[in-house]
Image: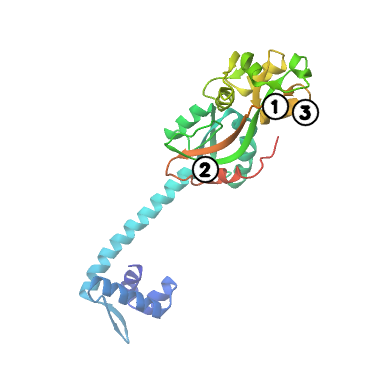
Amino acid sequence: MELLVAVARLGSLGRAARELGISQPAASGRMRALERQLGVALVRRSPGGSRLTESGALVTEWARKVLEAAADFDAGARALRGRRDSRLRVAASMTVAEYLLPGWLTALHVRHPGTAVSLAAGNSVLVARQVAAGEADLGFVEGLDVPADLDAAVIGHDRLLVVVAPGHPWAARRRPLPAAELAATPLLLREKGSGTRQVLDAGLAAHGGDAVALLELASTTAVKTAAVGGAGPAVLSELAVADELSAHRLVAVPVAGLDLRRELRAVWPAGHLPAGPARDLLGLTRRPAPRD
């Protein structure tokens, strides 16, 4: 259609071909193909140039309207992509938000310096709801299951550790703690709905037990602070307590036969692959995130 409109304006198939950056044989082939498709002759060729037939003039007017509509469509699509790429809404579970996302978002800023990123941190159940409701473009969860209305990809692995302050009696144990004793001991815990709590409850359930809460706190930092202060044993991500273990502010307590490993996942609405900055952020999660 662009070729036909150019022929009408320039009066020559050769000049139209040069304007569109194609060879004259290719232009002739395209014109013949269009004529075969429509079933009418569009252009009469002569040594002096090319002239539209009556049908060709009518089709050219239609073609102009189609091309204008296509240009409007392209402009609108570019505007939508620009609006999409100008912001990124991320929802993440507390461990990912505090210990992994800062490095990923720093790297993302290098690629998309003009993208405004908003981060909502909460437990894994809340994150899944936000993504499913369209309130976040990409989410990160730590729980055991992914809702059916979300697609997911494993982006890493983590494990939970039982930790105590150095003065706690468990810190001096030489043998692993029995799972039954852990289940019977009041613990510093994250709230129900958090990925950490889900994994702990599932691990203890395999031994016929259930977690007993000494305190339920809504953030990893709050649980860790209480544990360092000697309030009681806590169960936290290895990522979250790495510095405290290294500085001997906390001591890890092995537990016999208790599997507290878990997968970290990115989630997005089912059937809709992440695009733009969300796609790039997902790609960055495949690399080790730099630590502050």
Gap between marks 2 and 1 measured at Cα = 29 Å
Give the amino acid type for the residue marked by disc 1 in the picture.
Answer: Val
- Find residue 241 and name its label: 1
Gap between marks 3 and 1 measured at Cα = 9 Å
What residue appears at the point 49 percent right and 27 percent down from the top-left corner? 125
Gap between marks 2 and 3 measured at Cα = 34 Å
Task: Quadrant for residue 239, please give it.
Answer: top right
Could you say which is closer to the camera, residue 251 or residue 18? 251
Query: Which part of the image, by quadrant, shows the C terminus?
Result: top right
Question: Circle 3 sits on which residue?
Answer: 246
Give the image location of residue 97, x and y in percent: 59, 31
Question: Circle 2 sits on which residue?
Answer: 278
In the rendered image of this protein, does residue 240 appear above or below residue 16?
above
Give the crowd class for mark 2: few <14, some 14-19, many >=20 residues within 10 Å.
many
Give the image location of residue 272, x and y in percent: 43, 44
In the rendered image of this protein, does residue 216 appear above or below residue 8?
above
Give the amino acid type for the residue marked by disc 3 in the picture.
Answer: Ser
In the rendered image of this protein, does residue 281 appear above or below residue 10?
above
Is tag 2's residue or tag 1's residue first in the polypeptide sequence?
A: 1
